[in-house]
Image (cartoon, grey):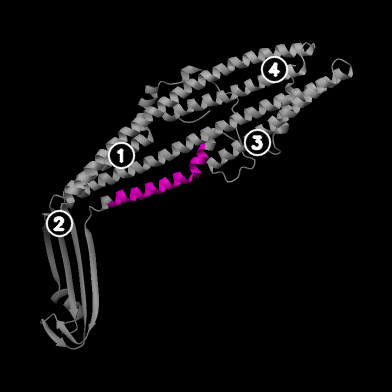
Amino acid sequence: MKLTRYPLLFTLALIMSIPTGTIAQHAWTLEECIDYALDHNINIKRQKVGAEQATNTHQQARKNLLPSASANISHSYNFGKTLNRDEYVYVNQQFQYTDASASTSVTLFNGFQKINTIKQRKYQMLAQLERIEEARYDVTMNIVTYYLTVLSAIEQRKIREEQLAVTTDQIEQVKEQIRVGKKAKGELLEIKAQAASERADLTNAKNELSMAYVDLAQVMNLDSIERFRIEVPKKLELMGGEQIKPTDTVYSQALGDFPMIQRARYQLEGAKKNLTVTKGTYLPELSFGAGIGSYYSELSKPSFMKQLRDINARMGLQLSLSIPLFNQFNKQNDVANARLNVQDNKLMLQEQKQNLYKNIQRAHNEAKAAYENYQANLEALESYQEAFEYAEERYEVGMVDAVEYRIAKNDLSRARSNVSRSKYNFIFRLKLLEFYMGQTMSL
């Protein structure tokens, strides 16, 4: 009575185990789960907001090169002792007074601080954009992890269903053998006990599958998990150990565009530009300004427009030079701290590279171990399959009892479960290496 028999029974058991209404529903692929999670992840959305803020800051740094301009107008009602600006004497009478002016100024030179600030803000913006990619990487790997967990749980449930289906069919056969006197009643009790144990195992497998779906849906930020099902690949190709890329190969490819490394690079360049900006405060600042203004006084006889336009109009140009002489060594301290910040960012970049290499090295070794474990479990499954078939043949002719047969069957079931778990563990380790190499996640 081999586990490969009764295909119709297994198919019916599998169909009956699927909740009503799920057969025709949409099954989510890995790519669809990843895309949905990327669109609905809160952390990614927050990082995008931060990127917009960094972009605005960069654009404002560029706009700071433009001249500044302002205009002022005031109107006053005077009484008591007040200055008459036309004759520059104090009078004691009521009158109205209007003053208007406009001015503009532009920085001609300030140690290239504005130019270097633009570059600094650009690197800060690029670093923030890499934070978005970091968040996307994290979400992607979480989805891959939980997706594979669901696939593994589906396979575990299927193994339990097939095992129970065989035992259920065996119960009917033993009943018939008892009826004709070929088996003792104790055999039936043993098999029923086995069926009860297998029902409990199936219940646990179903619960684990349900929780795996909950975990995946929560990582995706799915609004509802009702009727949520994933697509089970028809066949997962596992080529062998040659799929495991060498550590140095993975590292050299990851080093070029891995988000954490890129962000550290941009932060270092931004720190260097900040140092240049800070050094620029040592240099003089040269600025140019122009202004125009006029006023109207009720004490004067000419009309409002004539006073503003012809009589009281004034214009002026201004060129100013500010030379820093002494400021309690604040600038020197700022430059020293900016230089230390550059050094700290260099160390951070070096640390990120070291961590990346260590993580890839660990992932490579874990992938190798996972493959070896998978191969060992395949060999064990082959041995337990042969042992079960031998025990089954002896049981059918009465050479072993139901207890020995149950032990052989349980060993085979456990071996199948181990193969399934080790297979998905190996797949995950391969996906992790692909993740470091920037490859698209798919099955």
Residue 426: in magenta span: no
Measured in 3D between alpha carbons, the distance from the residue under mark 1 to the one under mark 2, in whole angstroms, is 32 Å
The mark closer to the camera, 4 or 3, is 4
Q: Is residue 128 above or below residue 204?
A: below
Measured in 3D between alpha carbons, the distance from the residue under mark 1 to the one under mark 3, in whole angstroms, is 47 Å
Measured in 3D between alpha carbons, the distance from the residue under mark 2 to the one under mark 3, in whole angstroms, is 74 Å
Q: Nearer the viewer, residue 194 or 295?
A: 194
**Res 273 quadrant in image:** top left
Residue type at mark 1 is Tyr
Q: Which of 83 and 66 is in front in this view?
A: 83
Q: Which residue is drawn at 67% across and 27% down?
A: 158
- Sequence-wise, which precedes: disc 1 or disc 2? 1
The mark closer to the camera, 1 or 4, is 4
As helix, strand or loop, the secondary structure at mark 3 comes to helix
Crowding at mark 3 (Cα within 10 Å: few <14, some 14-19, many 20+): some
Residue type at mark 4 is Ala
Q: Nearer the viewer, residue 118 or 295?
A: 118
- Sequence-wise, which precedes: disc 2 or disc 4? 2
- Residue beneath disc 1: 266
- Sequence-wise, which precedes: disc 4 or disc 3? 3
Report the span colored magenta: 34-60
Residue 253 shows in the view: yes
